[in-house]
Image (cartoon, rainbow, N blue to C red):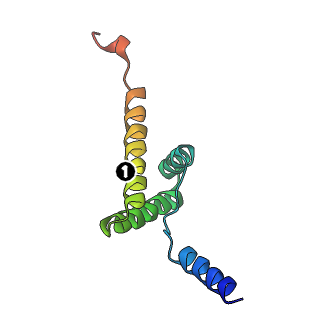
Amino acid sequence: MKKILIRIFSLFLLVSCGDSVKTYSREEKQKIIELSTQNNKSKQELENILKDLKEKAAKGNNKAKNEYEEFLKIQNLQVNKSQNKKFDPNNLFD
């Protein structure tokens, strides 16, 4: 009985002390960033996510650092895509 209780307590302790970094798939990140360009509420949510990840990364959490960097990469790609849509090579030499 003691062994079972010790195992349950150990498991509970491990689970409660685990990482609290929510991970997002690449598609979820893209959707969040796309929505943030259209909606102020979504933009605020994205800023909160990035702020939280940045704080956790500064404390040494590698998972948070990777998530933060991925969000920034996708955000930069979205900005570059929107800027490239405005470029028309046919009008380059006119």
Left of 85 or right of it: where is 42?
A: right
Name the residue carrying label 1: 69
On the image, the x and y values in percent for residue 64 come to 41, 60
Q: Residues within 10 Å of mark 1 (few under 14, many from 20)?
A: some
On the image, the x and y values in percent for residue 74 come to 43, 43
Q: Is residue 37 above or below residue 44?
A: above
What is the number of callouts on the image?
A: 1
**Which of 1 and 10 lies nearest the eye of the viewer?**
1
**Which of 40 and 1 lies nearest the eye of the viewer?**
1
Report the amino acid beneath label 1: Glu
On the image, the x and y values in percent for residue 5 come to 67, 86
User: Which residue is at a point 27% across and 10% down the rendered structure image?
Assistant: 93
Farthest bottom residue? 2
User: Which residue is at a point 43% across and 54% down the rendered structure image?
Assistant: 67
- Which quadrant is home to the N terminus? bottom right
Q: Is residue 13 above or below residue 59?
A: below
**Which of 39 and 13 lies nearest the eye of the viewer?**
13
On the image, the x and y values in percent for residue 3 come to 66, 84
Farthest right residue? 1
- Which quadrant is home to the C terminus? top left
User: Which residue is at a point 37% across and 57% down the rendered structure image?
Assistant: 65
| Element carrying mark 1 | helix
Left of 33 or right of it: where is 55?
A: left
Residue 60 lies in quadrant: bottom left
User: Which residue is at a point 54% across and 53% down the rendered structure image?
Assistant: 24
